[in-house]
Each structure stands twice: as structure tokens, then as C-alpha cells.
Amino acid sequence: MPARPFRFGARTVSDASDSELFAVTGFASNPFPEPGLDTGALYVAHMSKQVDRLNRWVNNITNTTDLAQQPGGPVCPIAVRGSIGVGKTHLLKRLERDLSTVRMISIIRRNLPDEGMDRLLLATLLLGSLPSGNEETDLPRFPSALPLLDRIVMAARSVTLARKVRDAINSFTGSPIASPLLRLLNESDPAREAELRAWFARWLLRGHTTPIQRSRLGLTRPLEGEGQAIRAVVDLMRAARAACQVQVWFILLDQLEDLWRVGVISPGRRARFLTDLRSLIDLGLEGAPIAVLLAWNTEVTMGEDKLESEYQALWRRLGDPIDLPGLEAKDVWPFATEYLEHAQTVSEKGVKSTNKRFRQLLENSTEGLVKDLRQDPKARLGPHRFAPYQVLHHWRKAAVRIAHTFGSEPIREG
């Protein structure tokens, strides 16, 4: 498969307000959204090396996990970290959007707190987000293994893929899903096959199945252990790749620092989750089409060396993390222009009609804004860097202040 570069370019419509105030400026609303709101604008010029590493990571994985290979080559994980507000989550959202447009690439992005830290289990997270196979929208609207199972079975009955899918399943030594998958493929009665698929899908999602149903699937017990459940997910992805339904499944896990928040999760549950992560990564390194990206904040409670000092076995598998930097003073105005150009394109549907005076007044305020940033302890990341999150906040306030100077009548450009 040819390399597919990771591109920063997709844009989405902003949901900003203040339409009346900004009408005279040429914008439909404040071009600088509330910090934390993902509008699709993303300035990356200050971290070109970091973006290049992400590009190489994606390209290496998509090239290594060629669908013609069985088994595939090792799929390495990667880590992204940085101070609060440097844009980790926005970067992952852009990666998610860009990869979701690529055929046979599945992707999930999860913030760990969204899953409920008191009941956080890696296998549950994965089983609830199974891809549905080779289609434009690769995630089902509700947790279900049926769409992917349907596609695997269909492919296994085609002339071109039958042998490849069966050989892949037969290679799953000790797999919890090898027997039910083969029974599905060997069933000739369509009604019976549909019944088996429904039972198997329910079993995969840890739903209730009777001893008789499990016996007919060749299963001896419910899917309970985390290790067994993770192995079931990974082997299902192997079968899906053999069936040319999934090339690789990217799993982006953000806010890993919450594992160390006091009173949020017990040390035992944290150790269980990180051990399961290591097992998942190991399966990828053995050739399973699973690509893991871990991201965390280095300032909240985790610290830069928590994972390294407490879970070296996992840390060693991640390699050198990608450290995201803050903005320098020279980046403050180019950062603003990224948002201005994005908002201009969205609000005017590609027509360049931004009020030049508004833009010029914003640019003229850059020096003062940088001074404000240097005096803002929340914005400073060391002596020469600023958090993009706070830079955006300052530009938003500057835009409101300048928009008020226009009065109620539009001022002509030029």
C-alpha cells in the first residue's frame, strides 16, 4: 500500500458567537474560538519536527501492515506528551479526522476520564468500539461486533479470500475466537449461521449467553478475563485484515495522567490497565494490526517520569516520546493568522472578504499581547514559550476589544 502522509488540512465549521459584534469586521463571529473548542484550525509550524515524526509513524505502520502480508510486520506504539494547553488533544483530533478518511483504516480516540475512571478497563473500552469493517464510516453507532463478523464471514466465502481467511484463523494458536469463527464459516444453513453470529457477537461484548449457546460455538465459558478479552479483540482484527476489511486499527488514548490523580483510581486498577496496555502493544509488535498512541499532560499529577519510573516494561516499548513545545514570541502572530484564515474560509465560503483594518489592528496589537502573555503565569511555559491554549484566550479578548472600536457602521476596506 502506498504511503499515506498524515496531513494537517481538514477544516470544520466553527460554532462561535458574537455575530452582531463581528459583522462589521468581515467575520461571522469571533475568529478566535473559546479555548478548548475544536474548530479545525491548528497551528503546527512551531512543531514541524514533531509532526514529521507522527507522519513517519503513520506511514511506517500503513506500509508495514500491508494486507498482502500474513502475518504482518511489527506495529510500534508511540507516545505524545507536553505541558497543559500545548495542543495534545487538538493534535489527536486532527489525526483522528485525517485517518478516518482513509479506506480500511479504523481509528478510535478516547479521553480516559470519559470512560469513567472508577470502572476503567481496557478490554471493555476496545470491545465497545469495534470497527465495522471496510466502509466510509468505520465505527458503528452502538457497540456491536455483528457488522465486522458479517464482513469476515462474507469474505471467507469468496473465491479470492476463502483460503487466506481460514489460514489466518487456523494460525490463532490458543485463541478464544478461533473455534467460533471456524464454526461460523462451516455452517451452511443461513438461518443457523445468523443465529451463531448473534450469539458470538453477544459473547464478544460480554453479554449473556447460555451454556448451550456457548457449546454450539465451541466455547466453554463466558468472555471474562481481561487478557482473554484483549486477545479476542486482537485476533478479530487479524481475521478482519485477512478478510481485507481492516488494514490497521489506530487506538489513541489521551489524558493518561488521570491514572495518577489522587482518589480517582486505585493503584491496583492503574497497574491492571497499564499491564493490559503493555499486552496490547506486545501483540502489535508481534504483527497484529493494532497501533497504539498514548498521550499525557506532564504538569498535572503524572510528571514526566511517572510512567518511566513505575512501569518501565511499558515505557521501554514506547520509545522516545514526542514532546510538544509551546509557542515562541515569533509564533504568536502566525498562530493568530491560522485562525483568521480558517474563520474567513468558513464564514465566507472561500470568499476573501475580511476587513483589512480589523486584521491590521490585530497585527498591531501583537507586541502588547506578547507582553501580556509574559505577565500571565498560566500562559508561560518557561522563559520563552507560551501555551497555545492561553495564547488563543488572549487573542480572543483582543478581537473583542478591537471589534468594539468599529462602532455600529461598517468601515470600508483600504
Image (cartoon, grey):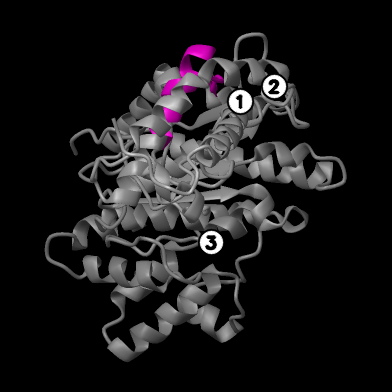
Q: Nearer the viewer, residue 208 or 100?
A: 100
Observer-nearest residue: 132 or 373? 373
User: Above or below — where is 251 with respect to 2?
Assistant: below
Q: Which residue is mark 1?
A: 387
Residue 210, located in which quarter of the rendered image?
A: bottom right
> As shown in the figure, which amino acid type bears the numbered disc 1?
Ala
* Comparing labels 1 and 3, the label whose residue is closer to the camera: 1
Magenta residues (range): 321-339
Residue position marked by numbered label 3 in the rendering? 127
User: Relative to residue 88, is residue 223 depicted above or below?
Assistant: below
Residue placed at 59% from the left, 17% from the top?
368
Crowd around label 3: few <14 · some 14–19 · many ≥20 (10 Å)? some
Whole-percent x, y for residue 270 in the image: 75, 43
What residue is rendered at 86% in x and 40% in y? 262
Give the Cα separation between the discs numbered 1 and 2.
17 Å
Vertical comparison of 20 with 54: above or below: below
- Disc 2 residue type (three-letter): Glu
Q: How many marks?
A: 3
Mark 2: give few (<14), some (14-19) or many (20+) Cα within 10 Å: some
Q: Residue at x 30, y 66 (%)?
A: 152
Q: Circle 2 sits in a helix, a strand or a loop, which is it?
A: loop
The residue indicated by pointer 2 is: 304
Circles 1 and 3, Cβ within 8 Å, touching? The answer is no
